[in-house]
Amino acid sequence: MTPAEARPADEPDADRRPFVGLWAPIAAITLWVVLAVRTPTNTFHFAPIVVAMAWPILRRVDAGRPIPQREAIVASATGVVLAVVVGAVLSLTGNLDGPTFWGDGESVVDDPLFEVVVFALAGGLAGYLVASLQGPGR
């Protein structure tokens, strides 16, 4: 029995609910912004990862199976863009002034916005892989 067959007749199919789970990156962004504004010299390294990967993963959870690659790409890319835009705004407003994982204080990799971009891309890739790929033995 497929997940679509297992759903009750009155419950809409997950494929027709593309925005389910979109609350997660919005909630993560809200928390990230509140924390960053309260403590701008702290770095919340994993916030861009969570923002970028939350929506595609929740889409898969809702569907109960891998989602189509196109949908996984759209959800992951949306998360990456959201994370980078929020990171840029935080950086421009002086609320992203904490240390980075790999910075030496003198190079571009010490820029917190660079870290946001790298982590957002990593989160987007992870979200895409989890959302669209079949597990082993399936």
Image (tube, helix red, strand yellow):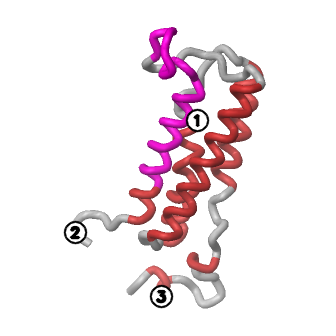
Q: Is residue 108 above or below residue 31?
A: above
Q: Is residue 4 above or below residue 26?
A: below
- Check the picture and name the quadrant holding the C terminus: bottom left
Marker disc for residue 34: none
Residue indicated by mark 1: 47
Magenta portion: prevailing SS class: helix
Amino acid on which the number 2 mark rests in the picture? Gly
The 10 Å Cα crowd at callout 3, few under 14, some 14 to 19, many 20 or more, is few
Q: Is residue 79 left or right of 66 when viewed as pictured?
A: right
Q: Which one is in front, 53 or 58? A: 53
Residue indicated by mark 3: 5
The x, y position of residue 24, in whole percent, is 64, 51
Q: In the rendered structure, which segment of residues is drawn in magenta?
A: 103-127
The 10 Å Cα crowd at callout 1, few under 14, some 14 to 19, many 20 or more, is many
Q: Secondary structure at mark 2?
A: loop
- Residue drawn at the location 52% of the way across and 50% of the way down: 53
| Labels 1 and 2: the sequence-earlier one | 1
Mark 1 and mark 2 in contact? Answer it, CB < 8 Å.
no
Q: Is residue 81 above or below residue 31?
A: below
* Mark pair 1, 2: CA separation: 32 Å
Q: Which one is in front, 26 or 86? A: 86
Residue indicated by mark 2: 137
Q: Is residue 31 magenta?
A: no
Amino acid on which the number 1 mark rests in the picture? Ala
Q: Is residue 86 above or below residue 102?
A: below
**Residue 16 can be seen in this image:** yes
The x, y position of residue 77, in whole percent, is 55, 55
The 10 Å Cα crowd at callout 2, few under 14, some 14 to 19, many 20 or more, is few
Amino acid on which the number 3 mark rests in the picture? Glu
Q: Secondary structure at mark 3?
A: helix
- Check the picture and name the quadrant holding the N terminus: bottom left
